[in-house]
Image (cartoon, rainbow, N blue to C red):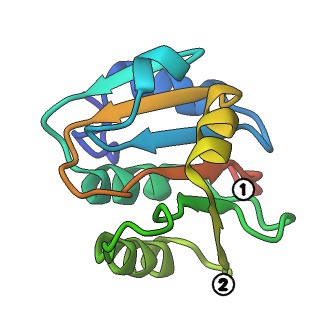
């Protein structure tokens, strides 16, 4: 164990976050997301929800302030009568851990899958909320100490 690393961050996930460079993307997929079939690097976080992982990741990894929308969510499919209330939770977590104000992006399901397949890594979770998938674009760490 290390001091200051949230215990939900596995050694494998910590390694991946460290390997990622500026502009690389990581996907946190809900329990329905086809993570294994889309991942270049797959991290299993079975039994964990996305909000707790998002908070832990954002404690360690900056978001890219040089792009318009460094966080992207999967849009609700047209005709699917569902309100992803988890998005409000994401907004609160982002506001807590990100120093600059950011706008969230939204893309359709198949565009999300295509973009996810190009991401540096995908985290497969046990999140039960629908449309909970999220893409984070890594920023620059300006101060190391």
Residue 86, quarter of the rendered image: bottom left
Please report the residue visible at 87 percent of the width from the left and 65 percent of the height from the top: 66
Depth check: give the residue in front, 77 or 26: 77
Image coordinates of residue 141 in percent, x first then y, are 72, 52
Q: Mark yes or no: residue 130 visible.
A: yes
Q: Residue furthest right?
A: 66
Label 1 sits on a secondary structure element that is loop
Quarter containing the N terminus: top left
Image coordinates of residue 92 in percent, x first then y, are 39, 81
Q: Residue furthest left?
A: 47
Q: Which residue is mark 2?
A: 101
Image coordinates of residue 82 in percent, x first then y, are 31, 72
Binning the other alpha carbons within 10 Å of mark 2 as few (below 14), some (14 to 19) or many (20 upward) gives few
Label 2 sits on a secondary structure element that is loop
Please report the residue visible at 23 percent of the width from the left and 57 percent of the height from the top: 129
Q: Which residue is mark 1?
A: 143
Position of 10 with respect to 107 (left or right) is left
Please report the residue visible at 44 percent of the width from the left and 49 percent of the height from the top: 57
Of callouts 1 and 2, the N-terminal one: 2
Vertical placement of 84 versus 122: above or below? below
Residue 93, quarter of the rendered image: bottom left
Total residue callouts: 2
Q: Mark yes or no: residue 145 visible.
A: no
Position of 142 with respect to 133 (left or right) is right
Binning the other alpha carbons within 10 Å of mark 1 as few (below 14), some (14 to 19) or many (20 upward) gives few
Vertical placement of 113 versus 109: above or below? above
Please report the residue visible at 55 percent of the width from the left and 49 percent of the height from the top: 109
Depth check: give the residue in front, 81 or 114: 81
Residue at mark 1 to residue at mark 2: CA–CA distance: 19 Å
């Amino acid at each position: 164990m290390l001091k200051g690393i949230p215990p939900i961050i596995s050694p494998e996930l910590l390694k991946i976050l460290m390997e990622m460079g500026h502009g690389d993307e990581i996907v946190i997929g809900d329990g329905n997301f086809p993570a294994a079939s889309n991942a270049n690097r797959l991290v299993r976080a079975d039994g964990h929800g996305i909000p707790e992982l998002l908070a832990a990741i954002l404690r360690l990894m900056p978001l890219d302030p040089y792009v318009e929308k460094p966080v992207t969510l999967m849009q609700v499919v047209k005709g699917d009568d569902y309100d992803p209330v988890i998005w409000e939770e994401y907004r609160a977590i982002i506001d807590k851990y990100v120093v600059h104000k950011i706008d969230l992006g939204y893309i359709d399901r198949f565009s999300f899958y295509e973009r996810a397949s190009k991401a540096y890594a995908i985290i497969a979770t046990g999140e039960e909320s629908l449309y909970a998938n999220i893409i984070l674009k890594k920023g620059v760490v300006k101060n190391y100490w």
